Amino acid sequence: MTDRESLLAEQEFLLASLEDLESERAAGDLDDADYAELKNDYTVRTARVTRQIRGLGSASAPSSSGRRRRLGWFGALAVFGVAAGWLLAMSAGERGVNDQLTGTIEESPRQQVFRCQQMGQEPSMLLESFECFDDVLERDPENAEALTYRGWYGVLASGSAQLAGEDAAAVELLASAGVYLNRAVQADPTYPDARAFRMVVLERLGATDDACADYAALLELDPPEMIGQLVAPVAQRLSCPGG
């Protein structure tokens, strides 16, 4: 068996293991803590194997078609992020009004998340946005919005790394982003942004069934129209039911 065949077999095993986790959790064989730990571990390992497979087949310089694919993916991420950020801004604004009505003068967690998100829109401030999100999470580890957007900015960073040809860094950043998004979904399974962003990560990792499961969950949540429009192309590419 060649190195590539061995890696493909390992990738298939890991993806199957990710699917099995869902069944084991539904059957009550795994508690939430074990489920989260195992899923994070399998996600990171899958990302590393995927990186190795791509490395075996990559040339010293990316082809023009590969470059176009990278540009296309990064462009899609940018559009996705801007639109989702707009939704968060609307949400933050609405919550901000309520905070003022109750007499609160301090920045609310949602307003801080929005401020972190604004920081991350400037490439030069991406690391500062990570620190901003981490500050929220230090005080509130289960803040679904902070977890979601901390993960999403990791996805954007992964896109930037891939665009620059730094494939190893791109895969590691994507795996780390997936960990945050898994935590976000666990913290609030009804938060559409977390499901949508994780769907993008799962597509990149080749976990089609898990990505389609997130899409099915999104449809049940009746997400904002813009989120639905953003994930529809992903669902179509993966041939998800209802996509």
Image: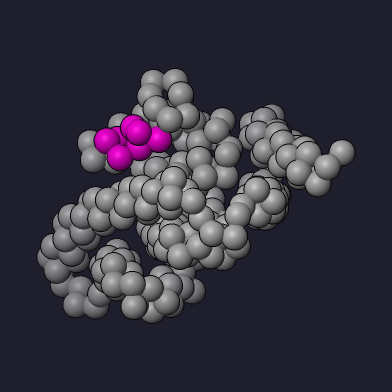
| Residue in the picture at 58% in, 37% down | 207
| Residue in the picture at 87% in, 38% down | 1
Does the rendering let one see residue 183? no
| Residue in the picture at 39% in, 21% down | 242
| Residue in the picture at 25% in, 55% down | 82
Q: Nearer the viewer, residue 122 or 72?
A: 72
Q: Nearer the viewer, residue 99 or 135?
A: 135
Percent position of residue 118, x then y: 26, 69
Percent position of residue 80, x then y: 31, 49
Percent position of residue 234, x then y: 40, 35
Q: Nearer the viewer, residue 84 or 58?
A: 58
Q: Nearer the viewer, residue 201 or 59?
A: 59
Residue 119 included in the magenta stretch of the image: no
Does the rendering let one see residue 58? yes
239 in relation to 114, above or below: above
Percent position of residue 240, x then y: 46, 25
- The reply, left or right, for residue 145 in relation to residue 52 is left
- The reply, left or right, for residue 31 in relation to residue 172 is right
Residue 233 included in the magenta stretch of the image: yes
Rendering colour mode: one colour
13 in relation to 194, above or below: above
> Which segment did they paint magenta?
228-234
Question: Does the magenta stretch mainly form a helix, a strand or a loop?
Answer: helix
Quadrant that contains the C terminus: top left
